Image (spheres, helix red, strand yellow):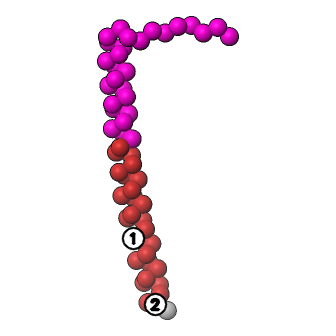
Amino acid sequence: MKNKKDIFIIFLLTATIILTTYNTIRINSLTDRLKQTSDSIEKNYNGGQVYITPTEK
């Protein structure tokens, strides 16, 4: 019985490590994309490329 419990605990730890690593990588890539987006918005804004037009309702 103890052997099954040990295997289950090892499985849970492994799954936790895998999910944590996956989420960290995903968050890092999303952060990079956000930085790129904000950089391009900033360049466009500073270059006078952003035009805000009022929309009629």
The magenta stretch spans residue 4: no
* Residue named by callout 1: 14
Instruction: Look at mark 2 in the image and give the residue it sits on.
Output: 2
Q: Residue at x 39, y 56 (%)?
A: 22
Is 23 drawn above or below residue 17 in the view shown?
above
Quadrant, the C terminus? top right
Sequence-earlier tag: 1 or 2: 2
Q: Amino acid at mark 2?
A: Lys
Please rate how many residues cluster around mark 2, counting C-alpha atoms within 10 Å: few if below 14, some from 14 to 19, many from 20.
Answer: few
Q: Position of residue 17 (x, y in %)?
A: 38, 64
What residue lies at 34% left-to-right and 23% top-to-bottom? 40
Res 9 → quadrant: bottom left
Considering depth in this image, is 3 or 41 the residue closer to the camera? 41
Q: Quadrant of residue 12?
A: bottom left
Instruction: Give the image location of residue 51, x and y in percent.
Output: 45, 9
Tell me the kind of residue under disc 1. Thr
- Residue 49 painted magenta: yes
Q: Residue at x 35, y 8 (%)?
A: 48
In the displayed structure, 48 sits above or below 4; it is above
Q: Which residues are magenta?
A: 30-57
Task: Look at the numbered disc 1 and give the secondary structure of its residue.
Answer: helix
In three-dimensional space, the C-alpha distance between marks 1 and 2, rounded to whole angstroms, equals 18 Å
How many marks on residues? 2
Q: Secondary structure at mark 2?
A: helix
Residue furthest to the bottom in view is 1
Q: Are marks 1 and 2 in contact (CB under 8 Å)?
A: no
From the image, give the main secondary structure of the stretch colored magenta: helix
Query: 4 or 44: which is nearer to us?
Result: 44
At a point 36% along the width and 52% down the height, the residue shown is 24
